[in-house]
Image: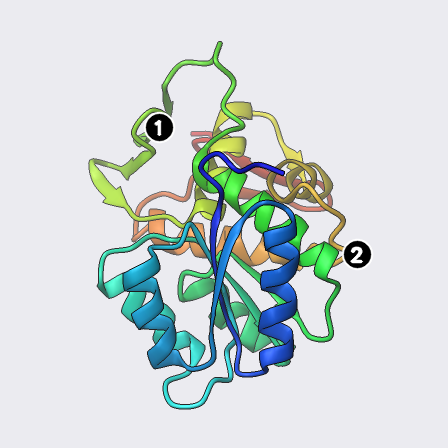
Amino acid sequence: MNTENPVRLLVVDDEPHIADLVATVARYEGWTAVTAGTGEAALAKAAEFVPDIVVLDLMLPGIDGFTVLDKLREAGTAVPVVFLTAKDATADRVAGLTRGGDDYLVKPFSVEELMARLRAVLRRSNGQAREAAKPALLQVGDLTMNEDTREVARGGRPAELTPTEYELLRYLMRRSPSVMTKAQILDHVWEYDFGGRSNVVELVISHLRRKLDDGDEPLIHTVRGVGYVVRQAAR
């Protein structure tokens, strides 16, 4: 177990047995974990504990998980958030990712899969997958990414991306003008088996387009039957 600078995990769920189970497994891996059972308690714990990552239920007494996430972002924290919820409708998944969540796992769930997702989100958030031989500044058209500062801009306009959005865009920019398949993207960005639910790639691509295009010429293109590519359109 890693006891040097352990990961700090906040588990927010109104079912104590679920929160305690996740926290116990995390502690077994050497993490530091605390729990909260309401949205208000989650915000207080987040301010006091300053977690590295949060597992957040959507359906909470008082303020719900979406509101908790909004208040965390309004407070200026970019802490990665993984939703853990019984709500499995596509609209809920879209809402969770659109609101700034980094992943979404539906109950009933496997603790092993949850921990795998948490580790993958942390790797994306910390930028540990950087290849040292590559340049720090990536550019495609007027889209730029500084890998040292993790700043992204389109036409000089900064874009605020979640860790997942950043890593997916970075992967496509590094391989531009090559086309990447959904399977390649899932393998690189998520690093675990999604059980065929590759629509998560489409969701994140959609969020990136909304944040980056803003009326400009699209840079993220869909190649039907193949995958996605970042490049300027042929003139």
Q: Residues within 10 Å of mark 1 (few under 14, many from 20)?
A: few
Instruction: Identify the residue under disc 1.
Output: 141
Q: Is residue 176 above or below residue 15?
A: above
Say whether residue 54 is left or right of residue 194.
Answer: left
If the image is split into quadrants, where does the C terminus sit?
top left
Q: Residue 181 appears in which quarter of the rendering?
A: top right
Identify the residue at image location x=60%, y=40%. 189
Q: Is residue 198 above or below residue 18?
A: above
Q: Amino acid at mark 2?
A: Gly
Instruction: Identify the residue under disc 2.
Output: 195
Identify the residue at image location x=54%, y=48%. 31
Identify the residue at image location x=32%, y=71%. 43
Q: Residue 151 placed where, x, y %?
A: 29, 35
Q: Nearer the viewer, mark 1 or mark 2?
A: 2
Query: Which residue is nearer to you in this view: 196 or 176?
Result: 196
Identify the residue at image location x=64%, y=34%. 180
Q: Residue furthest right?
A: 195
